[in-house]
Image (spheres, rainbow, N blue to C red):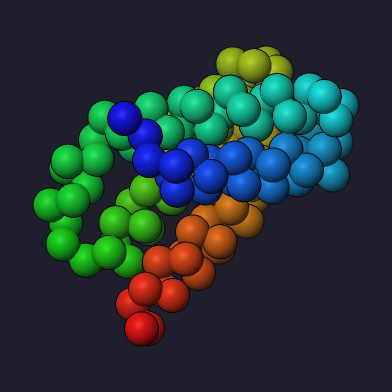
Amino acid sequence: MISPLLLGLLVVAAVIEALILYQTKWATLAGSFRDAAAINAASAALLLLIGPLLNQIGNVLAVVAVAWLLSIVAEGFVLMLLRRRPAAASYFTSMIVNTASYIFVLLYVLSFLLI
């Protein structure tokens, strides 16, 4: 079962990523929200599947960094499939949207480490 906090982070990430996709003229506003929902679902599924492996890393900042990299790869692949754009454009767009959304994830994680 997905926790409400994780679900909230996914929604915030999807909204941030959709607005960035729209600003970069990736798709229309409705298409950007649809694509953001699809890429975040794929990324969340991948991270849930390999979550136990990520927990073995031990360092929470390293876990966030690995999750960020895996999200870029998964979401870039899905964007490439959704819009049939070149791999370079899809992965670059994925890197931009994931960097923006993972800034908030990192701030959230750091808020617990600094307490």
Write the residue at 49% across / 59% down: 105
Q: Position of residue 6 (x, y in %)?
A: 43, 44
In this rendering, would 66 be left or right of 80?
Answer: left
Q: Position of residue 62 (x, y in %)?
A: 29, 62
Q: Position of residue 9 (x, y in %)?
A: 52, 47
In the rendered image, which quarter is residue 48 located in?
top left
In this rendering, would 38 be left or right of 21?
Answer: left
Q: Position of residue 65 (x, y in %)?
A: 37, 58
Towards the viewer: 49 or 89: 49
Towards the viewer: 1 or 74: 1
Quadrant in which the C terminus is drawn: bottom left
* Residue 113, above or below 67: below
Write the residue at 87% across / 26% down: 28
Asked whether residue 15 appears in the rendered view, the answer is yes
Quadrant in which the N terminus is drawn: top left
* Residue 47, above or below 114: above
In this rendering, would 98 be left or right of 50?
Answer: right
In the rendered image, which quarter is residue 20 located in?
top right
* Residue at the outermost bottom position: 115
Write the residue at 59% across / 45% down: 13
Towards the viewer: 48 or 4: 4
Towards the viewer: 29 or 81: 29
* Residue at the outermost front position: 4
Asked whether residue 73 appears in the rendered view, the answer is no
* Residue 28, above or below 21: above
Write the residue at 72% across / 38% down: 18
* Tag count: 0
